Image (spheres, helix red, strand yellow):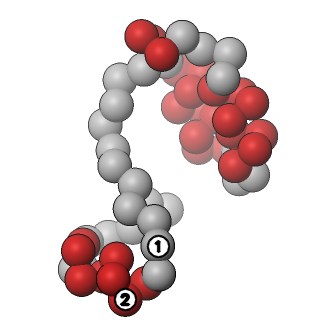
Amino acid sequence: MADVLAAARSIRVHSDFIAAVGKNRTEDFDYCAVSIVGPRAPVDKIVGKLPRMP
């Protein structure tokens, strides 16, 4: 799991991140976030003023 966290903090290209974490088993993941992706206005209606990840 530490490898996944390190990758999430350091890799900025999505395809590179997928390649890095793809080496792990799904059972090894501890899910702790949800991503909401889409046009800004509808997403803002859902999440309001919640802070975004850095």
Depth check: 32 or 2 in front? 32
Image point (53%, 31%), residue name = 5
Q: Which mark is residue 38?
A: 1
Do tag 1 and tag 2 residues touch (Cβ < 8 Å)? no
List x then y, in percent, for residue 38: 46, 73
- Badge 2 amino acid: Ala
Whether residue 54 is situated above or below residue 18 in the rendered picture: below
Image point (74%, 30%), residue name = 19
Label 2 crowd (10 A; few <14 / some 14-19 / many >=20): few
- Badge 1 amino acid: Gly
Q: Residue 41 carries which label?
A: 2
Q: What element carries label 2?
A: helix
Q: Residue 2 carries which label?
A: none
Q: Tell me the quarter of the picture where residue 29 sits.
A: top left
Depth check: 37 or 6 in front? 37
- Could you give the CA–CA distance between mark 1 and mark 2, rounded to whole angstroms? 9 Å
